[in-house]
Amino acid sequence: MDRISVNHQIHFGKPCIAGTRITVQSILELLNEGLSFDAIIQDYYPDLQVEDIRACLRYAIALVAAEDIRLMPV
């Protein structure tokens, strides 16, 4: 997780790729649109590495894994 940082002075504390102002959310939204890692790097963020994008996915997985979801009966 050393590739993801949270700084309350950058994007109101949203998690970003370390050393950038690129939010994890931005990368996840591009992945959700169906863009490949290579397309994200080539078309949007040429300074990123594939491992940065993988770190965003790992971060999201860790958040979901840590959630305590309680379903309410309907």
Image: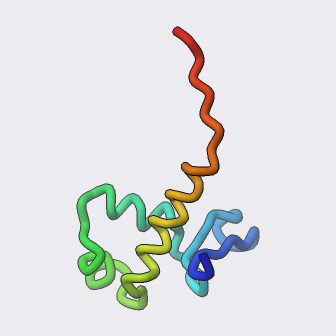
Number of callouts: 0
Which residue is located at x 48 percent, y 69 percent?
Answer: 56
Quarter location, residue 73: top right
Residue furthest top as drawn: 74
Describe residue 24's horizontal placement relative to residue 42 as left or right: right
Which residue is located at x 42 percent, y 74 percent?
Answer: 54
Instruction: Give the percent coordinates (x, y) of residue 67.
Output: 62, 44
Instruction: Give the percent coordinates (x, y) of residue 33.
Output: 28, 57
Which residue is located at x 32 percent, y 82 percent?
Answer: 41
Instruction: Give the percent coordinates (x, y) of residue 28.
Output: 41, 61
In the foreground, 59 or 30? 59
Instruction: Give the percent coordinates (x, y) of residue 57.
Output: 45, 65
Which residue is located at x 52 percent, y 9 percent?
Answer: 74
Q: Is residue 67 above or below residue 16?
A: above
Residue furthest bottom as drawn: 47
In the foreground, 66 or 19? 66
Quarter location, residue 26: bottom left
Residue furthest right as drawn: 8
In the foreground, 1 or 10? 1
Quick one: quadrant of the N terminus?
bottom right
Describe residue 3's horizontal placement relative to residue 26 as left or right: right
Q: Is residue 14 above or below residue 43?
A: above
